[in-house]
Image (cartoon, rainbow, N blue to C red):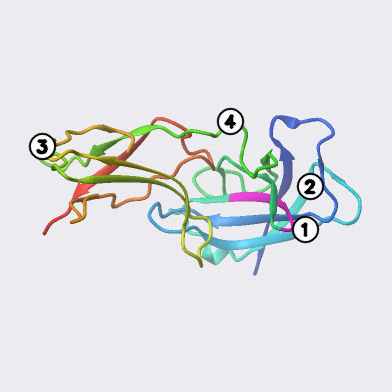
Amino acid sequence: MSFILSGQVVPSGNIEHAKIAPNSRVHIQLLDVSLMDAPSVTLAEQIIHVGQEPFSFPISFNLTYDPSRVLISNSYSVSARVSKGDDLEWVSTSRHSVLTQGNPTNGVSISVDNVSKNGTLPGLTKLSGRIVSSPSTPASKAIAPNSRIIVQLLDVSLMDAHSVTLAEQKILTAQDQSRSFPISRSVSRSLTWITTSTHSVLTRGEPKDGVEVTLDVVQH
């Protein structure tokens, strides 16, 4: 037995007269997003092909899913992206929760943002924050001298491919200098500290600034 989750894809801010370019592809997915430290799991998807003429919003969709795969304790969301060839044109940038925990089971509206010509979302040019030690780390612990701190912004969208580095920052500690936490934005040749959980940013309702990255000390 299958269930259907229906809804519409609409432009963010209800932009009037927004259209999808000819020969585009609209990809809608129902995702299990319960695990923060693992990729989401696709439960259902629909691909809508736009013909030779521009297509106006809203776009209606119907996702057919197996209800036996939906657990009341898990979290689920729907996402949408519009692409033409290899170029992303529209994408949902906030989480649209569905099915469980009091969220809608039908009539879902997925808002999408227009992507600029260089493939980025407007206004997303700099991501700042700080690095802190995990609560279980002794307060006296610090980054040792001659260490290298590497902070990376990664695209982890694809489940069957390696992540893509979008931006990177390196901070070096001098020979006679240790660094106390917190460290504003920013591991040594012998690994001493590392993130052990995923810190999601930028899309699906995640923070776009003021991010706090937690490190755990590595036991040797």
Q: Nearer the viewer, residue 144 or 215?
A: 144
* SS under mark 4: loop
Q: Which residue is mark 3?
A: 176
Q: Position of residue 4 (x, y in %)?
A: 69, 58
Which residue type carries mark 3? Asp
Q: Which mark identifies residue 25?
A: none
Categorize mark 2 by other alpha carbons within 10 Å: few (<14), some (14-19), many (20+).
some
| Pointers 2 and 1 in contact (C-beta within 8 Å) | yes
Categorize mark 4 by other alpha carbons within 10 Å: few (<14), some (14-19), many (20+).
few
Which residue type carries mark 2? Ile
Q: Residue at x 78, y 47 (%)?
A: 59
| Separation (CA) of disc 1 from disc 3 | 60 Å
| Separation (CA) of disc 4 from disc 1 | 29 Å
Q: Quadrant of the C terminus?
A: bottom left
* SS under mark 1: strand
Span colored in magenta:
78-85
Q: Nearer the viewer, residue 183 or 190?
A: 190
Q: Nearer the viewer, residue 116 or 33?
A: 116
Which residue type carries mark 4? Gly
| Separation (CA) of disc 2 from disc 4 | 26 Å
